[in-house]
Image (tube, rainbow, N blue to C red):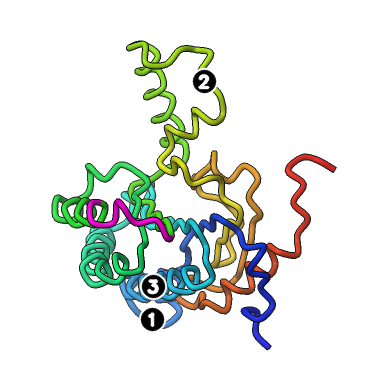
């Protein structure tokens, strides 16, 4: 019996978010370049997307590149950008055929032009899909997202398209990158680190956290199933009794 067999398909988390962590350490343990770890980690994304899709998960979010990741060595950044282009090109047709919608969380303008072009093409070609939302956070920071929403609300207040009494939780969420998707139910972080690293701060307000010591390149679909089983055993009270 596997963890997949224990999953209650009537009690799935609607939105799973994953902080992919441990690629560099995985490579270092094998005396390989950090960039090789990122490549293996990207392969793992495909497996987890397929497993989530087959279960019926509605939204799946990956933290791929944060606003703080620009501090990393340039060759590592370049490799990450190359991987984005490679996986968009090789997986887009499959994503389209499976009715998955790609969304990007974050400001992609600072990314290389080729990366922007590939991303925008993927966004356009999957914009009408509705089976699952696949969110990729690129040049993303949770605090930046909240500030962006506040600024855009301010602009709409000034031009009169909304008034002060319109501002509430639901309206605010319409200004986030995840508009219409709902909050995170399950946040997964592999690699043994116990922090949220500025990821989707608004959306995770009542998320269940699942931390694992397994490094991301080793985080198989069975580990995903294990996390979901753990989620389903919890009593979610949302502040109530």
Are the two marked residues, 3 and 1, in contact with CB atoms closer than 8 angstroms? no
According to the image, label 3 marks what residue? 46
Side (left or right) of 52 relative to 75: right
Q: Secondary structure at mark 2?
A: loop
Q: From the viewer's perspective, is residue 142 above or below residue 116? A: above
Bounds of the magenta span?
Answer: 124-131
Q: From the viewer's perspective, is residue 29 above or below residue 216? A: below
Q: Position of residue 55 (x, y in %)?
A: 54, 71
Q: Choose the circle earlier in sequence order: 3 or 1.
A: 1
Q: Quadrant of the N terminus?
A: bottom right
Quick one: label 3, few (<14), some, or many (20+) residues within 10 Å?
few
According to the image, label 1 marks what residue? 31
Quick one: label 1, few (<14), some, or many (20+) residues within 10 Å?
few
Q: Quadrant of the C terminus?
A: top right
Q: Secondary structure at mark 1?
A: loop
Who is closer to the viewer here, 86 or 235?
Answer: 235
Q: Position of residue 22 (x, y in %)?
A: 47, 67
Q: Choose the circle earlier in sequence order: 3 or 2.
A: 3
CA gap between label 3 and label 1 equals 25 Å
The residue sitting at 66% across, 65% down in the picture is 10
CA gap between label 3 and label 2 equals 38 Å
Residue placed furthest toward the right: 241
> Majority secondary structure of the magenta segment?
loop
According to the image, label 2 marks what residue? 167
Are the two marked residues, 2 and 1, in contact with CB atoms closer than 8 angstroms? no
Quick one: label 2, few (<14), some, or many (20+) residues within 10 Å?
few
Q: Position of residue 190 (x, y in %)?
A: 55, 66
CA gap between label 2 and label 1 equals 53 Å
Q: Quadrant of residue 194?
A: bottom right
The residue sitting at 63% across, 69% down in the picture is 9
Q: Position of residue 64 (x, y in %)?
A: 38, 57
Mark nearer the viewer, 3 or 1: 3
């Amino acid at each position: 019996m596997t963890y997949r067999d224990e999953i209650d398909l009537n009690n799935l988390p609607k939105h799973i978010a994953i902080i992919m962590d441990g690629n560099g350490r995985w490579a270092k343990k094998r005396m390989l370049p950090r960039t090789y770890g990122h490549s293996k980690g990207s392969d793992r994304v495909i497996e987890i997307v397929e497993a989530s899709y087959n279960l019926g998960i509605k939204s799946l979010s990956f933290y791929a590149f944060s606003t703080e990741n620009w501090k990393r060595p340039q060759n590592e950044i370049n490799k990450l950008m190359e991987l984005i282009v490679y996986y968009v090109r090789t997986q887009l047709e499959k994503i389209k055929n499976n009715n998955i919608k790609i969304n990007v969380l974050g400001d992609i303008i600072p990314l290389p032009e080729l990366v922007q072009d590939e991303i925008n093409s993927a966004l356009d070609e999957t914009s009408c899909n509705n089976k699952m939302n696949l969110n990729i956070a690129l040049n993303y920071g949770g605090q930046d997202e909240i500030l962006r929403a506040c600024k855009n609300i301010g602009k709409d207040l000034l031009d009169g398209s909304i008034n002060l009494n319109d501002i509430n939780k639901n309206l605010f969420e319409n200004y986030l990158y995840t508009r219409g998707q709902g909050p995170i139910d399950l946040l997964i972080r592999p690699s043994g680190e116990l922090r949220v690293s500025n990821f989707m701060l608004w959306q995770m307000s009542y998320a269940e956290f699942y931390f694992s010591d397994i490094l991301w390149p080793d985080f198989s679909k069975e580990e995903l199933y294990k996390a979901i089983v753990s989620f389903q055993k919890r009593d979610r009270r949302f502040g109530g009794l």
